[in-house]
Image (tube, rainbow, N blue to C red):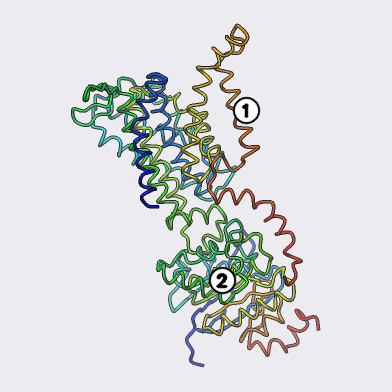
Amino acid sequence: MKLHRSSGHLTLAIALLALPFIIDALFGHGWVRITDFALLYIMLALGLNIVVGYAGLLDLGYIAFYAVGAYTYALLGSPQFGIHWPMYVVLPLGALIACGFGVLLGAPTLKLRGDYLAIVTLGFGEIIRIFLNNLNAPVNITNGPQGISAIDPLQVGAFSFGSSYEWMGIRIDDVHLHYYLFLGFTLLVIFVSRRLEDSRIGRAWVAIREDEVAASAMGINTRNIKLLAFAMGATFGGISGGLFAGFQGFVSPESFSLMESIMVLCMVVLGGMGNVGGVVLGGVLLVALPELFRNAAGPVQQALIGKVIVDPESLRMLMFGLALILVMLWRPAGIWPSTQRRREFAADDSVLHQEQETVYDASK
Amino acid sequence: MTQTNLLEVENLKVSYGGIQALKGISLTIAQGELVTLIGSNGAGKTTTLKALSGLLHPASGKVEYQDKSLLHIPAHQRVANGISLVPEGRGIFARLTVAENLLMGAYVRSDKAETAADLERQYELFPRLAERRTQLAGTLSGGEQQMVAMARALMSHPTLLMLDEPSMGLAPLMVEKIFETIRDISAQGVTILLVEQNAKLALEAAQRGYVLESGAITLSGAAGELLGSDAVQRAYLGA
């Protein structure tokens, strides 16, 4: 059994290592780049999953932490201020600052839940974006809407993830190198998420999600545990943001719009809140499917009707919305929900039914 | 009676906004005692328990537990110190299984082997729960949910167990069963503060009682005496 499992892991490892080359050979370079972005989004979604999936705190401004991570990297590794700190300093620093912002958002919202929390977090996300947009006057810090360009590539010493190398006759390009770097970080985030899920902290999050008063009657420090959820989620967002800035070489406020927050939330909800596998699946689907539509919608219309009637870009959003509705109708707990969530959704009716009955319940 | 008091409350006042819910109550509970606090709706019974468990902050007064002031100790630490509340309306985690609910009660304890043993002990005390350990707590009957709430509180090894209206909304037969269990728990040496509207049952189970009316304690004494007193008879027992 153990042997079987480890051979399964080995197959998975080989598949993951070979994946960028397979994609490259089948679909071309562009799709490897899309895969890189998918990994960044998976990290983001896993971070948000801690806040929304585990602790049940609806956060609509999550992209702000991604922005904080990205701008930290951009400001400390670009000609903007002439600072060029190495990535192994800037990335952890970005994660740390994002974590601080997580606490900053968490602290005043401790007493809020559900819709109220959603509104405040939405506002927080917008505040960060607008700040970045306007911090070019009176002192130019973020360069405003133009954004910051010529950001240093991700590099360790002389080795840059932004260059191409030849290794034993195989050409490894920047998109491949970034894939491996991002894969490493994603696996780390997955590992941390899984460990948290099974931990005392994970159980405390579940308790808070279920009933906060009862949770504190259990001896759970609800304040710290909620702040921890915000901080952990924000940290993952910050790391992902730093990697994004180094990969893209350019950041501007428009990368961090409300739509992005909603996109990441959709990955979590659609894939399966609270389940690491589901969230990863959600991330892959929501990055890959829209791209697929963007590329396929034009040619398909051309072949079927002879001309392009609907603009592929708007069709993409239409199909995206339709997919969301269908999934929520048929699999309300997500495509691949955690066992607990699935139970919760299935139980809701019977629980309510039962609660009305209990008052008169006899001696059964 | 040179017994040391486990809990001493003196002149405890609690206000919600401008309304004074507790107008300075005083009570003591000795180690191992079963004390009941009875009173009608809105008398301030739940407020008292919330203040004692740290969910509410009193305006003034003194609360001493094991000879140390509790006032600045947050709710979560009080559980670790052995004060456990079974909240009104039970407050179970409806969408977790019975076993998960009980394990949540052991949150403040870190010894895994002992927690597992505790779990078995609860199943002995509440055989009904053993049968339903994998069932979602929300799908249980009211009485069973009350059992879950009590067993969950016991998982934290409380020194002082506070029960808020355990008979609420239960069928008479189930109420009897719950009170039987309360007496069992008390016999095991756990100090209990029982808040009840059902004055007769509560006074029959307890050793001492306090009567709370509009935020003030109007009567106190041995449970048997209270049960026989005219005032209690008139006000709560409809005699």
Task: Name the element at disc 1.
Answer: helix
The lab-note entry on whether marks 2 and 1 share a chain reads no
Q: Which disc is residue A322 wearing?
A: 1
Q: Which residue is nearer to you in this view: A14 or B155?
A: A14
Q: Nearer the viewer, mark 2 or mark 1?
A: 1
Identify the image quadrant of residue B114.
bottom left
Above or below, A57 against A212 in this view is above
Q: Which residue is nearer to you in this view: A199 or A212?
A: A199
Residue A304 visible in rendering: yes
Type of amino acid at the residue the image marks with label 2? Ala
Asked if residue A60 lies left or right of residue A199, the reply is: right
Subunit under mark 1: A
Q: Residue at x 54, y 75 (%)?
A: B161
Q: Which disc is residue B151 wearing?
A: 2
Q: Which residue is nearer to you in this view: A161 or A50?
A: A161
**x, y (%) of residue A165?**
23, 22
Asked if residue A25 lies left or right of residue A289, the reply is: left
**x, y (%) of residue A140?**
34, 23
Label 2 neighbour load within 10 Å: few <14, some 14-19, many 20+ = many
Identify the image quadrant of residue A213.
bottom right
Task: Name the element at disc 2.
Answer: helix
Question: Which residue sits furthest right?
Answer: B239
**x, y (%) of residue A129?**
45, 29
- Split into 4 quadrants, where in the image is the C terminus of chain B? bottom right
**x, y (%) of residue A108?**
48, 46
Subunit under mark 2: B
Label 1 neighbour load within 10 Å: few <14, some 14-19, many 20+ = few
Above or below, A87 against A51 in this view is above
